[in-house]
């Protein structure tokens, strides 16, 4: 059986009563406290809500630095149209690319969600 | 509601104290608070307290005296001291006791606070990817806030500069050397836009407060400070907190500080404009700026104007963190909330020496905020 390339997607949950979206998925709605959550797949495109730059290497363990060693990286929240902001590592060439609500696309879901700017995405794909 | 007064407040020394345990810092603070109240441990009828990582408060009875009183351990992160005080006040209000004690203490080593993802209900991947770093949250929150409300980077440095300057006037502070805004701004960037000198550090210290009923306060004489309002709360739907894999809902996240401060003011029948001196959680300088508006002391975006005009300095219209706050005193998690109370009590009594707010301040306010979205506030008056 050949390998199928599946585009990354974040599995969340959505309340059938009040439409609240939760990530990671929950069984109880944190807005209305009803056990009415069903599986829901989030959009893969959003905008940068806010970010910072991790300037120093986090403590290892638990941090696993990349094979070529630590370099500063951006981390922030991506606002999705479903009404939720997702914490993610943000891939870019230049941190300034992330300013002013830059559009970003999901490129990985593990170990944490990872989004890339359009400029960065061109290179990856 | 019956009147509750603070009749005693005490601190241990803050900052590094090699060879001294966290429990000993708690005992120093309790001894100082009891002396201040003019009472002995045998007069205390109920106690509440805790630390984040330095042991159980109720074990202190072996050094204080085995009087048989109920002593409840509190573990509530940065709100530990505040939550202990809420319980002590409620014990007085309910009539269960006339004299109650709250204590908070901690002794964190350098570089403490190593959160494990599993303790926060997160997949291990958050640790592997380098996202279990507390300071990232503060950087992200203030970065967004500065963009939305046109606050500039020099204002972040100005707040930290004030903290070190006030610390230099406070004999009990850990950091007693003033640092210039230029040096603060030029220090190593930790998480943009926050540099190393803009953050508080894990520290050491103990703080204790004795509260009493109206009758007991009268009997004791002394210099009681009235507790006009006290409130504690947890986050509501949609809030933005440390180690949150998401922020739910649309629009601006609500703040637990806003609802908790409003509840304390409502109980007191007073408002932020009545306050003469305030203590606001300053985990880093951006937090103090945001908490000014979240607690109702100004509109969002008004902070820069107030700070540049010196209004939050000792001698300004609303002096904030006159003892140097967490930035100059360090953050012993269990102790900070009660350190704030001690500072306001000292200011309202006019005993703050070189850092005394002029003009006889009559009304004070305290605010703690911590992970994951907890807050405690008080309104005090003389």
Image: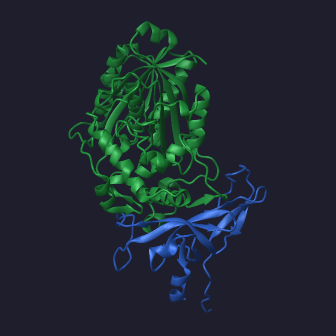
Chain colours: A blue, B green
| Rendered view: B215 above or below B52 | above
Residue A22 lies, in percent from the top left, at 65, 60
Is residue B250 visible in this depiction of the protein? Answer: yes
Q: Residue at x 29, y 35 (%)?
A: B170
Task: Tell me which corner region of the image, top left, top right, bottom left or bottom right, holds residue B183.
Answer: bottom left
Residue B104 lies, in percent from the top left, at 39, 33
Residue B211 lies, in percent from the top left, at 46, 20
In this rendering, would B68 be left or right of B255? left
Locate the N terminus of chain B and report the quarter of the image it occupies: top right
**Of all residues shown, which one is farthest toward the right?**
A17
Q: How many marks?
A: 0
| Rendered view: A63 above or below A93 | above
Q: Residue at x 31, y 22 (%)?
A: B31
In this rendering, would A47 be left or right of B124? right
**Of all residues shown, which one is farthest toward the bottom?**
A2
Judge by depth and name the residue closer to the eye, B291 or A24: B291
| Rendered view: B246 above or below B278 | below
Judge by depth and name the residue closer to the eye, B143 or A41: B143
């Amino acid at each position: 059986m050949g390998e199928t390339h599946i585009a990354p997607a974040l599995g969340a949950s959505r309340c059938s009563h009040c439409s609240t979206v939760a990530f990671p998925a929950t069984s109880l709605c944190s807005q209305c406290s009803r056990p009415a959550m069903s599986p829901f797949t989030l959009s893969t495109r959003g905008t940068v809500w806010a970010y910072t730059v991790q300037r120093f290497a986090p403590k290892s363990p638990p941090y696993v630095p990349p094979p070529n060693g630590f370099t500063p990286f951006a981390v922030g929240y991506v606002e999705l149209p479903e009404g939720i902001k997702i914490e993610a590592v943000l891939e870019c060439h230049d941190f300034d690319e992330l300013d002013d609500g830059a559009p970003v696309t999901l490129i990985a879901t593990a170990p944490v969600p990872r989004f890339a700017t359009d400029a960065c995405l061109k290179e990856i794909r | 509601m019956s009147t509750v007064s603070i009749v005693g407040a005490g601190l241990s020394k803050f900052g590094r104290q090699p060879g001294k345990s966290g429990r000993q810092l708690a005992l120093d603070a309790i001894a100082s608070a009891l002396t201040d109240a003019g009472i002995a441990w045998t007069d205390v009828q109920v106690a509440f307290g805790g630390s984040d990582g330095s042991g159980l408060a109720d074990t202190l009875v072996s050094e204080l005296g085995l009087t048989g009183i109920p002593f409840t351990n509190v573990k509530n992160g940065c709100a530990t001291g505040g939550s202990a005080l809420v319980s002590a006040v409620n014990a007085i209000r309910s009539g269960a006791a006339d004299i109650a004690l709250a204590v908070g203490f901690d002794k964190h080593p350098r570089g403490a606070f190593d959160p494990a993802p599993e303790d926060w209900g997160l997949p291990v991947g958050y640790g592997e990817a380098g996202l279990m770093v507390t300071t990232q949250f503060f950087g992200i929150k203030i970065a967004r806030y500065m963009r939305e409300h046109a606050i500039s980077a020099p204002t972040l440095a100005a707040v930290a500069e004030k903290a070190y300057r006030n610390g230099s006037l406070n004999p009990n502070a850990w950091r007693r050397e003033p640092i210039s805004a230029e040096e603060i701004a030029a220090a190593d960037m930790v998480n943009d836009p926050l540099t190393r000198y803009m953050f508080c550090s894990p520290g050491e210290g103990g703080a204790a407060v004795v509260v009493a009923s109206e009758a007991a306060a009268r009997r004791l004489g002394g210099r009681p400070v009235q507790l006009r309002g006290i409130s504690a709360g947890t986050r509501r739907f949609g809030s933005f907190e440390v180690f949150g894999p998401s922020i739910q809902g649309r629009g601006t996240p609500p703040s637990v500080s806003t609802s908790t401060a409003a509840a304390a003011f409502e109980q007191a029948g007073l408002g932020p404009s009545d306050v003469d001196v305030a203590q606001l959680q300053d985990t880093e300088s951006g937090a103090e700026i945001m908490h000014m508006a979240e607690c109702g002391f100004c509109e969002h975006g008004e902070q820069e104007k107030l700070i540049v005009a010196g209004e939050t300095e000792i001698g300004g219209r609303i002096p904030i963190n006159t003892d140097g706050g967490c930035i100059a005193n360090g953050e012993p998690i269990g102790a900070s909330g009660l350190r704030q109370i001690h500072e306001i009590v000292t200011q309202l009594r006019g005993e703050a020496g070189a850092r005394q707010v002029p003009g006889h301040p009559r009304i004070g306010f305290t605010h703690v905020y911590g992970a994951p979205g907890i807050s405690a506030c008080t309104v005090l008056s003389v």
